[in-house]
Amino acid sequence: MINRDWKEIKAYAFCGELTSAQWAWEFLRRNPGYQQEWQQFWQTWQDLEAAYGKPPDRDFCAWKNDPRAWLPASECPDGECRIDEDKVLIECALGGRWGFHKFPPNPEDDDPVGEGRLNWRPRSEEELPVLSGEATHLSQEQMALVFDLSLPLRPQLDQARHQLQLETSRRRRENRLAPKRVRLLKDHWVMLLRILDARAAGEAAQATQLFGDEAVREAVALMEKGYLELLRIPD
């Protein structure tokens, strides 16, 4: 139980010097779910110590042969725990579930971070939110990701690169995306030039009937300003 008088701002003066790791701990230790799980874990841990001793006199072999010392590997779904025959040690399972490398600290411990009793697992960057094509009028070749400018950009850029690569591969597998290369597009561009030439000859209607409205719009767009975008396409 964390006993602080929430009405007394002085009770929180220590917060002025907290690191991000310590702030994370202050919030987690107030989580009722974590408090309950830790109490259950600690009771099991004490029972195991009563049976097999404490370091350096602990009987490690007997400890590890006790089913109470283990949980199913599914209890550590992120895969960071060492798995032994589809099971993981209870300290690693509980620690991993709440973001720790291994041993979960007591919620009543004021500063396991500063005292070196706690190591957070490195945070992997979460996937960036993806804007839907309908909302942003994106074409099949485009993808819009949302960046949080209040957070460091480098890890977000790394995550964006990963997401873009995966999405590119997926769309190509589904034949919904063709790579842009001059050799692959030249026949299409020839058609667009024919449209522009037909317009210049006063035969725009015939070109529209033959090639369609969308092709005409693309040809005009390339003629007016879009031609600069062709410079980005590799040979």
Image: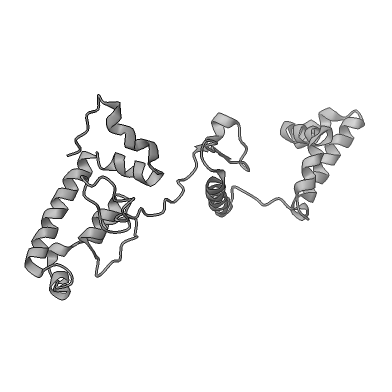
Total marks in image? 0
Left or right of residue 169, residue 85 in this image? left
Q: Position of residue 119 (x, y in %)?
A: 34, 55
The structure residue drawn at horizontal position 33% and vertical position 33%, both measured from the top left corner, is 13
The quarter in which the C terminus is drawn is bottom right
The structure residue drawn at horizontal position 28% and vertical position 42%, both measured from the top left corner, is 28
Q: Position of residue 58 (x, y in %)?
A: 14, 71
Left or right of residue 135, residue 105 in this image? left
Q: Is residue 131 above or below residue 97?
A: above
Say which quarter of the image contains residue 213: top right
Q: Position of residue 69 (x, y in %)?
A: 16, 64
Say which quarter of the image contains residue 76: bottom left
- Please identify the residue farthest to the right as the structure is shown: 201
In this rendered view, identify the residue nearer to me: 173 or 57: 57
Left or right of residue 233, residue 34 in this image? left
In this rendered view, identify the residue nearer to me: 151 or 12: 12
